[in-house]
Image: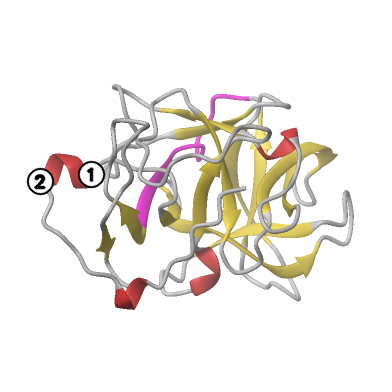
Amino acid sequence: MFSFIVPVLFLVFTAESNSQQSIVTCGSVLKLVNTDFNARLHSHEVQYGSGSGQQSVTAVSDEMDTNSYWQIIERNGSPQCNRGRVIKCGQKIRFMHLATRKNLHSHHFQSPLSPNFEVSAFGDDGVGDEGDDWQVICDGAYWKQSSNIRLKHISTEGYLHLSGKRYSRPISGQYEVSSTPKLTNAITWTAAEGVYIEPVYSENKSATSTYIHDEF
């Protein structure tokens, strides 16, 4: 399990080229924004009242909400990835919710508000199962911060999706996030605010610096 801790306000930063800084890396902490709704992937200690009963995953419009940070870690069952290793297009990874230490997860339970697959937060401190693995679908060699991506769930072959439907209490106004097998609207995401680890292209080299995109 990747155990990188982020004391972001006390880090020393080094200058990087714009091209290096734009690449998303393992260990980075970021928000994911749905490009159709401008809403950020979110979780919290609220369980679903149906389906799996696991911790719910939603999307919120509030860009300042600190419960929308996710850390990139290695796929389930793989060795811990080196901090700063660049994420390639087509690579399989996991997203760990920073506040609750649970992984972005999906399975064949039906989502609460739509006929899609439920997306939840599952596991403990990064430990989970194969339902936590997602493939980064993007153009080019590497996932760039400015790129639009799709996240394909390995087990169900669905895409991380924002249905446009909103929940009522206790999470009033938050959007339903689900997984859909269809190439449809609202399955495109982009990296936003976060703490990005300096890219490392060699597995034998450790990252030594980070940079911040916007507030944390």
Q: Secondary structure at mark 2?
A: loop
Quarter residue 6 falls in: bottom left
**Figure check: 95 above or below 107:** below
Asked if residue 130 lies left or right of residue 78, the reply is right
Q: Main secondary structure of the magenta part?
A: loop
Is there any visible trace of residue 190 in the rendered image? yes
Magenta stretch encompasses residue 185:
yes
Asked if residue 199 lies left or right of residue 70, the reply is left
Q: Residue at x 15, y 59 (%)?
A: 14
Looking at the image, which is closer to me, 62 or 125? 125
Q: Earlier along the polypeptide chain: callout 1 or callout 2?
A: 2
Real-space CA distance between mark 1 and mark 2, rounded to the nearest whole angstrom? 9 Å
Q: Amino acid at mark 1?
A: Ser
Q: Which mark is residue 22?
A: 1
Q: Residue at x 75, y 52 (%)?
A: 122
Q: Residue at x 44, y 50 (%)?
A: 27
Query: Where's residue 145, x and y in %?
Result: 29, 44
Image quadrant occupied by the C terminus? bottom left
Query: Where's residue 187, x and y in %?
Result: 51, 37
Instruction: Identify the residue under disc 2.
Output: 17
Query: Where's residue 110, x and y in %?
Result: 82, 41
Looking at the image, which is closer to me, 184 or 91? 91
Asked if residue 20 lies left or right of residue 41, the reply is left
Is there any visible trace of residue 117 in the rendered image? no
**Figure check: 179 above or below 56:** above
Q: Which region of the structure is painted magenta? A: 182-192
Looking at the image, which is closer to me, 129 or 12? 12
Magenta stretch encompasses residue 123:
no
Q: Amino acid at mark 2?
A: Ser
